[in-house]
Amino acid sequence: MRRVHGLATYGRSIAAGSSTSSATVAAAMPNLLVRSAMLSTTPSGSGPQFLSRRLADYFGLSGTSVAAGVVGTMFFSVAASSVAQEVHAKELPKFSPKDVVLYQYEACPFCNKVKAFLDYYSIPYKVVEVNPMSKKEIKWSEYKKVPILTIDGEQMVDSSEIITDLFKRIHPESTCADAEEEAKWRKWVDGHLVHVLSPNIYRNASEALESFDYITSHGNFSFTERLVAKYAGATAMYFVSKKLKKKYNITDERASLYEAAETWVDALKGRDYLGGSRPNLADLAVFGVLRPIRYLKSGKDMVEHTRIGEWYTRMEGAVGEPMRINA
């Protein structure tokens, strides 16, 4: 109980933000990580190295080290607010699967991309939240990452491939004249936009804890794992984000976020959506990865200081309410 109490007390001191100096945080972080890892009861491993691997897995990374992976893709799914606006008619799918199941981590940006697609096309789906420590929910699959989507028992993997495959099933005769433009911006989402977000979400201790407050409430964690994820996770990500800044040559977190938002708005060239009168797959990809951070401090700042807000509001209306089926 002393370890748990110590973590909680330290977490409150971090949340105080300005009252905790960077030097104090830096000095105490290594000890906190070690103490946090000691709480883990997962039989397959222990210690800081094991914790880092599991955190990397939870964030949808392929590497075994948080610092080496694309940790910038850590996002948290939050409900979009209701907006008073003209709502564009949603596209209805031309196929009607009976059973759609998404195996996910709530924090995974790639999972959120798939959910944005399913929501937009009004495809009801069930969600199985995978425990990042044991991964027992996907032991049946040879593919050990998320998202995994099953359509009437058929397994589909990799977010971009899932979305492309489903789109072809919905639009079997589609010959999009702007396919090259759409593909360019879909790659931009995975290759640039996601890397800009981590340094913003975790740019200081208070924002890191703000993010982990959500994950510990919605992820599939035991009580002990929630403590580890919240305090050790926020601690680790705070410092990892600093390494990511250097890796991706980011000198000013917010400036890079604002620049990415403005770049996307410029790509629209005055259109309501990149797809014209309706969102295309690039619109859905950008919206999918931004939706989880929209109501965190970084997302609020982004909307306040850039022109992306109008497009985002249109997307909220176009995508509509989540099609998730509560089991």
Image (cartoon, rainbow, N blue to C red):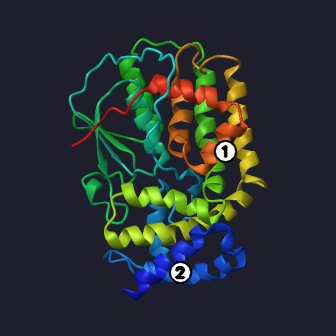
Residue 190 placement (x, y as % from top left) = 58, 42
Farthest-out residue, bottom:
2
Q: Mark 2: few, some, or many residues within 10 Å (few <14, many ≥20)?
A: many
Residue 222 placement (x, y as % from top left) = 31, 67
Q: Is residue 99 above or below residue 17?
A: above
**Residue 65 appears in the picture as rendered:** no
Q: Earlier in the sequence, mark 2 or mark 1?
A: 2
Q: Is residue 16 above or below residue 260?
A: below
Quadrant in which residue 112 is drawn? top left
Residue type at the position of mark 1: Asp
At x 73% / y 26%, what residue is drawn?
266
Q: Mark 1: few, some, or many residues within 10 Å (few <14, many ≥20)?
A: some
Residue 119 placement (x, y as % from top left) = 39, 30
**Residue 64 appears in the picture as rendered:** yes
Q: Left or right of 147: which side holds 199?
A: right
The residue that mark 1 highlights is 301
Residue type at the position of mark 2: Leu
Farthest-out residue, right:
251
At x 56% / y 49%, what residue is drawn?
296
- Real-space Cα separation, disc 2 to disc 1, in angstroms: 30 Å
Q: Is residue 122 above or below residue 115?
A: above
Q: Left or right of 308: which side holds 58?
A: left
Quadrant in which residue 205 is drawn? bottom right
At x 50% / y 65%, what residue is drawn?
64
Of residues 53 and 307, the one nearer the viewer is 307
Q: Which quadrant of the rendered structure holds the C terminus?
A: top left
The residue that mark 2 highlights is 32
Q: Which quadrant of the rendered structure holds the N terminus?
A: bottom left
How many numbered discs, if any? Answer: 2
- Element assignment for label 2: helix
Q: Left or right of 279: which side holds 196?
A: right
Residue 23 placement (x, y as % from top left) = 71, 78
